[in-house]
Amino acid sequence: MAEKFARELGFAAGISSGENFLGALLVQDDIDGDACVVTVFPDDNKKYLSAALLPEEPIGDGSLSSSDIRLQTFEAYKRV
């Protein structure tokens, strides 16, 4: 997901942020459609700039993967 954020939306997020995003999507699937799910992206991708984020891994049956997700836009809010 971190690579997809950078490639498709142009913002730097780290691996933990990608996992948070996928977790938020799974939670959203389990709750009422009118609810709003919020997550925090706790890291950026600076430490990964000189290397690949992660090696290619096989996707397990029933797993959510970045190839299953279409990103359209994002909104950022100030912390204060």
Image (tube, grey):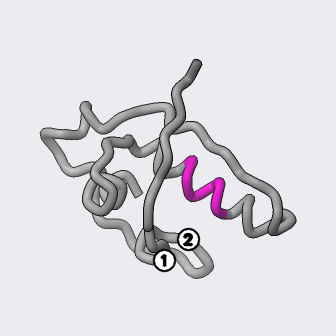
| Label 2: which secondary element | loop
Q: Residue at x 48, y 72 (%)?
A: 69
According to the picture, the residue beneath numbered tag 2 turns out to be 64
Q: Between residues 65 and 29, which one lies in front from this camera angle?
A: 29
Question: Where does residue 58 sit, x and y in percent of width and height?
Answer: 40, 73
Q: How many marks?
A: 2
Question: Where does residue 54 sit, x and y in percent of width and height?
Answer: 30, 53
Q: Which residues are magenta?
A: 20-25
**Rendered-image quadrant of the N terminus:** bottom left
Q: Amino acid at mark 2?
A: Leu
Locate residue 27 relative to residue 18 in the image: left or right. Answer: right
According to the picture, the residue beneath numbered tag 1 turns out to be 68
Locate residue 8 relative to residue 28 in the image: left or right. Answer: left
Is residue 24 covered in magenta? yes
- The label nearer to you, 2 versus 1, is 1
Report how far apart the C-alphas of labels 2 and 1 lie in the structure: 7 Å
Q: Between residues 61 and 3, which one lies in front from this camera angle?
A: 3
Q: Residue at x 30, y 38 (%)?
A: 45
